[in-house]
Image (spheres, rainbow, N blue to C red):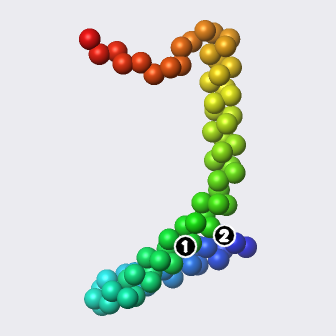
Amino acid sequence: MRLILVSGGLDAAGTLGILGALGSLPLLTVSGAVILFLESLALIFSFAPLTIASAMLLLIAAWKIHLENGIDLSPRDNRP
């Protein structure tokens, strides 16, 4: 339900911003930008656990490959 409200809010905020830009109404444009910012926070917090979990799985896989194969995963500068 939250994602439905967020997508509707993003549409409304984008429309406010476009109408404000076309009509030279800075208050309308700024209010659209503020709504977009606030709606994006809800998206960040709804997808953050999935992003953190996938990053942890990738780090664990890289660590396991490093332990099994002895591959050096540290960044190095290979300039002559």
Q: Is residue 80 left or right of residue 8?
A: left
Q: Earlier in the sequence, mark 2 or mark 1?
A: 2
Q: At numbered mark 1, what does the secondary structure look like: helix, strand or loop?
A: helix
**Is residue 32 toward the left or the right of residue 46 in the image?**
left
**Residue at (31% x, 83% y) in the render:** 21
Left or right of 21? Residue 36 is right
Instruction: Identify the residue at image location x=65%, y=60%.
Output: 45
Front residue of 29/15: it is 29
Judge whether residue 14 can be spotted in this image: no
Q: Residues within 10 Å of mark 1 (few under 14, many from 20)?
A: some
Q: Which residue is tagged 2?
A: 3
Image coordinates of residue 60 in percent, x first then y, are 68, 28
Relative to 65, residue 21 above or below: below
On screen, 44 above or below 16? above
Q: Amino acid at mark 2?
A: Leu
Compared with 26, 79 (above or below) is: above
Disc 1 target residue: 38
Q: Is residue 49 visible?
A: yes
Q: Secondary structure at mark 2?
A: helix
Question: Looking at the picture, which amino acid does disc 1 mark?
Answer: Leu
Q: Is residue 50 left or right of residue 17?
A: right
